[in-house]
Amino acid sequence: MPDPQALTTTVHLQQKLEGARALRDLIRKHREYTDEARQLAPPVVDAMARLGLFRALVPDSAGGEEWAWPTWMRVVEELSTIDGAVGWNAGVGSTANAIVSG
C-alpha cells in the first residue's frame, strides 16, 4: 500500500516545480533590469512570494508553508537554472525567514 505522506509530498513537489517553471518567462523578461539594478525586479519578487518561497521553510505553527526540504531544494534548483540571482534570493530569503521564525 502506498504511503499517503509520500504521495502528498510528491504531489506538492510537482505543484511547486510547475509553479517555479511558470515563472520562467517573467524572470527572463526582467533579467536586464535585475542585471542593471543589481536587485530582482518587483514583479519577480511578488511572483516568488505568491509561490510561497519566502514562507517555504517556516513552520505551519508560525504561519509558514513548511515545505519538505527536498521540495524546497528542487524548487530553488529549478529557479537557479532560470537565473542564478533568482535562485540565490529564493534560498537566502527562505532560510532567513525560517531562522527568524524559530
Image (cartoon, rainbow, N blue to C red):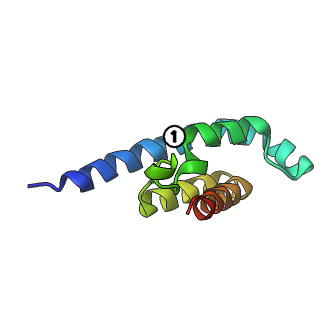
Residue 41: x and y, percent?
79, 41
- Judging depth in this view, the residue of 11 and 22 nearest the camera is 11
Q: In which quarter of the image is the C terminus?
A: bottom right
Circle 1 sits on which residue?
Answer: 19
The image shows residue 81, relative to residue 49, as above or below, that is below
Coordinates of residue 80 in the picture (x, y in percent): 63, 57
Return the x and y of residue 89 as percentages of the image width and height. Answer: 70, 56
Residue 9 appears left or right of 29: left
In the figure, residue 97 lies in which quadrant?
A: bottom right
Q: Which quadrant would the N terminus be assigned to in this image?
A: bottom left
Residue found 14% across the figure and 54% down from its top = 2
Q: Nearer the viewer, residue 28 or 42?
A: 42
Left-right relation of 16 to 31: left
Residue in the picture at 73% in, 34% down? 43
Using the image, determine if residue 96 lies above or below residue 33: below
Please name the amino acid that badge 1 sits on: Gly
The x and y percentages for residue 9 are: 33, 52
On screen, residue 102 versus residue 68, left or right, reads right
Q: Disc count in the image?
A: 1
Residue at the spot x=62%, y=41% of the render? 49
Secondary structure of residue under mark 1: helix
Identity of the residue furthest to the right in this view: 36
Residues 47 and 66: in front is 66
**Vertical placement of 27 versus 91: above or below?**
above
